[in-house]
Image: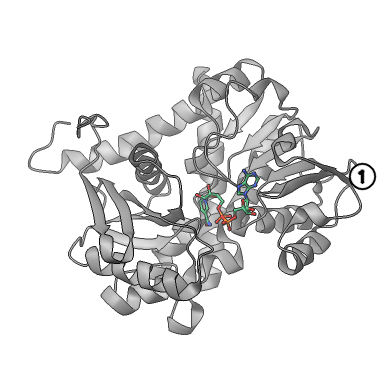
Amino acid sequence: MADPFKFADDLGPAKIIHVYEPAINLRAVLVVDNVALGPALGGVRMAPDVTTEECFRLARAMTLKNAAAGLAHGGGKVVLYGDPNMPKADKERLIRALACSLREVQEYILAPDMGTDEECMAWVKDEIGRAAGLPEAIGGIPLDEIGATGWGLCQAAEIAAAYCGLQLKNARVVIQGFGAVGKHAARFLAAQGAVTVGVSDSRGAVYNPDGLDVDALWKLKEASGSVADYRHGRKQAREEVVDFDCDIWIPAARPDVINKENVRRLRAKLVVQGANIPVTAEAEQDLHDWGVLCVPDFIANAGGVICAAMEYRGASQDEVFTAIKEKLRHNTRLVLDEAKAKNILPRQAALNFAGQRVKKAMSYKRWSIF
Ligand code: NAD
């Protein structure tokens, strides 16, 4: 058996729970990484192909993201194995069963992630009463519907652009993934005058240096399910979105999409990380060395979790938008200034800042090592 403590370091993970219910083929992993700041908050990802290691990395990203965003929450993540597009009745049964199996794990609050949504969280809430990212009808602020993360990305992009001699007006943007994060980022950026020149989703990519019509892309995504059907641009394979010439490149799909094999192909001045861990450590170092600025995931995409945490405490939608704007602009500036002053990667500056917060909280614990 593999070493169960192979991920262990100063911060966690506090618990790894494997859930297995053969009768309904429920297979899931929960990683509660760190709870020094409060109960772990992080999404339930439904996918056919995620490993425990990836779940741990995603949970760690939540620890750092929640700490950086100043939330009273630790980090955790669930991966639920299965096709997120399975028949709804089967999905509901799996999600409800998952919730029941985690009923007693009070230090983890379930929230939506890729493959799950507000409705899934309503089922969880119905079963165990402990979920964030709920539908409006039961007191939630539907974070994907309002585009909380896309709103935050737009704030981070605006601040970071200035560090690359850019401004959002007329900046050429490419977005990988046109789901809850990517499509709202496109919308908010367009409102600031940025021009989306390329997008992709799981079915393909499209590029037009003169700009794509974001409203039309939204409609296409709703109608046919894919931006690849957009007519007024050059259609390409989905992996080729990396090659699209632009100023700002926004990954909003899967982990590790920029890696040592393809990093040389990226043609942008700024990468604002919408997806979690979309750039491998090696590739991020290369980008830094080549003068491409990267705003790290756990700073740039914190809008969703800020929304979920505030919803959990009964805040209004307006309060959420204001808080995301303030926190994301402040944190982006803080991290980029620190990185510049110390000549370190923005991720390192962000890690230092978030890690210090977590360690400070851990220092109040009886068993503290800090
Ligand atoms: P989503 O399921 O709504 O959308 C994902 C999009 O990515 C879809 O358009 C899908 O077609 C596309 N996609 C999938 N595989 C692809 C590939 N190989 N190439 C190009 N496109 C591909 O998911 P989402 O909520 O938008 O999340 C996207 C990413 O952002 C994930 O990494 C998620 O963990 C992260 N994230 C989401 C939130 C949030 O608020 N939803 C917050 C923080 C981070």
111 lies above or below 36: below
Q: Is residue 59 left or right of residue 339?
A: left
Q: How many marks?
A: 1
Q: Residue furthest left?
A: 366
> How is the structure coloured here?
one colour
Q: Residue furthest front?
A: 23
Q: Nearer the viewer, residue 123 or 187?
A: 123
Q: Which residue is mark 1?
A: 210
User: What is the quadrant of the N terminus in the image?
Assistant: top left
The residue located at (45%, 58%) in the rendering is: 306
Percent across and percent down for residue 138 are: 43, 82
Percent across and percent down for residue 72 are: 31, 55
Percent across and percent down for residue 91 are: 43, 69
262 lies above or below 84: above
**Element at badge 1?**
loop
Q: Is residue 362 left or right of residue 201?
A: left
Percent across and percent down for residue 202 are: 66, 49
Q: Nearer the viewer, residue 229 or 107?
A: 229
Q: Amino acid at mark 1?
A: Asp
161 lies above or below 38: above
Q: Judge whether residue 315 can be spotted in this image.
A: no
